[in-house]
């Protein structure tokens, strides 16, 4: 029995930290926090056979919990920020869309609101906003590509939709003008990896955006529902992220029942920025009608 417990402990940690290029192993690695917490169970059972071994494994698990969940924040808390942004996955046909826009954009100090999984049948909600603000995705020629809508108080001076051979795959490139500074941005929402095919498509979108970043000039921002976690081998390779700024946060949970357990929430909604931008005041907020939390953050240009 003790060998089973020891094997279970090792297997849980191997799955948690694996970086194998494999569909099932990648899904398992996304649950790293849950697997680390589960490792306490076989470690406790080992008390019956070896107190020293059990306490050693428990100490290791505690250390891994602190390492993974990052109970600290590197938030810079900038005094004067330049641009305030909010982004949220609506989960399609959200009956609270008008209130979400009002609460987190019209009445809030946010300069840009990015909506993912926007349902085109709710386009009428944007009618008045389109006359007051800069809206991407409202025009019929744009048609909310990949379910993305961007509402901005800043001028959108450049727009581009990049599609792959599959018209459902791609991303949006927008450039915002702020006090003579151009913020080049990429917004994406790759498929959720519910099947191996969708997992492959998600990885392709992430890889394409990773290459796009290398060609972006000046200050840039990447934001979206990536449908993956920052420790995945497929995550976009950069260090200046909301996740690193805030510490661990969860933005999505598989079910509302698990949402009450903090270690089951996964950080799959992200923002990334160029090194000349400081990210601060990163936080997540509950949004009615969605299984995602709203991600809110502020940008400060180091050399505006």
Image (cartoon, grey):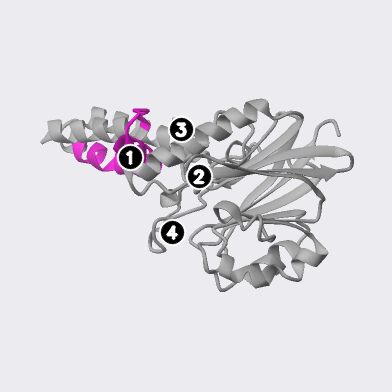
**Who's the residue at 45% across and 52% down the image?**
262
Among numbered discs 1 and 2, the one appearing first in the sequence = 1
Q: Could you tell me residue 160's position as x and y percent?
A: 68, 43
| Mark 1 nearby-residue class (10 Å; few <14, some 14–19, many ≥20) | some
Among numbered discs 1 and 4, the one appearing first in the sequence = 1
178 left or right, relative to 7: right
Q: Would you name the residue on which mark 2 appears?
A: 169
Instruction: Tell me how far mark 1 sits from mark 2, CA to CA.
Output: 25 Å
Instruction: Tell me how far mark 1 sits from mark 4, CA to CA.
Output: 18 Å
Q: Would you name the residue on which mark 1 appears?
A: 28
Instruction: Tell me how far mark 3 sits from mark 4, CA to CA.
Output: 25 Å
| Mark 2 nearby-residue class (10 Å; few <14, some 14–19, many ≥20) | some
Among numbered discs 1 and 3, the one appearing first in the sequence = 1
Q: Nearest the camera: 56 or 142? A: 142
Secondary structure at numbered mark 1: helix
Which image quadrant for residue 8? top left
């Amino acid at each position: 029995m003790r060998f089973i417990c020891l094997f279970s402990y090792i297997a849980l940690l191997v799955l948690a930290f694996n970086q194998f290029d494999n569909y099932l192993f990648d899904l398992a690695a996304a649950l790293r926090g849950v697997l680390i917490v589960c490792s306490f169970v076989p470690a406790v059972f080992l008390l019956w056979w070896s107190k020293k071994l059990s306490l050693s494994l428990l100490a290791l698990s505690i250390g891994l919990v602190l390492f993974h969940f990052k109970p600290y924040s590197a938030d810079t808390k900038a005094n004067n920020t330049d641009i305030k942004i909010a982004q949220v996955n609506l989960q399609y046909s959200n009956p609270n869309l008008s209130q979400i826009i009002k609460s987190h954009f019209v009445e809030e100090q946010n300069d840009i609101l990015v909506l993912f999984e926007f349902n085109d049948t709710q386009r009428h909600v944007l009618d008045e906003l389109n006359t007051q603000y800069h809206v991407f995705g409202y025009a019929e020629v744009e048609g909310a590509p990949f379910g993305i809508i961007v509402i901005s108080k800043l001028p959108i001076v450049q727009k581009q939709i990049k599609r792959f051979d599959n018209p459902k795959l791609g991303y949006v490139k927008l450039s915002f003008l702020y006090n003579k500074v151009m913020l080049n941005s990429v917004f994406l929402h790759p498929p959720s990896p519910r099947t191996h095919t969708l997992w492959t498509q998600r990885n392709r979108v992430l890889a394409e955006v990773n290459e796009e970043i290398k060609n972006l000039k000046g200050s840039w921002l990447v934001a979206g529902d990536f449908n993956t976690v920052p420790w995945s081998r497929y995550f976009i390779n950069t260090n200046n992220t909301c996740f690193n700024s805030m510490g661990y946060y969860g933005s999505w949970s598989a079910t509302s029942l698990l949402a009450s357990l903090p270690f089951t929430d996964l950080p799959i909604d992200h923002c990334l920025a160029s090194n000349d931008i400081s990210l601060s005041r990163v936080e997540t907020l509950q949004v009615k009608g969605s299984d995602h939390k709203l991600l809110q953050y502020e940008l400060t240009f180091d050399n505006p």
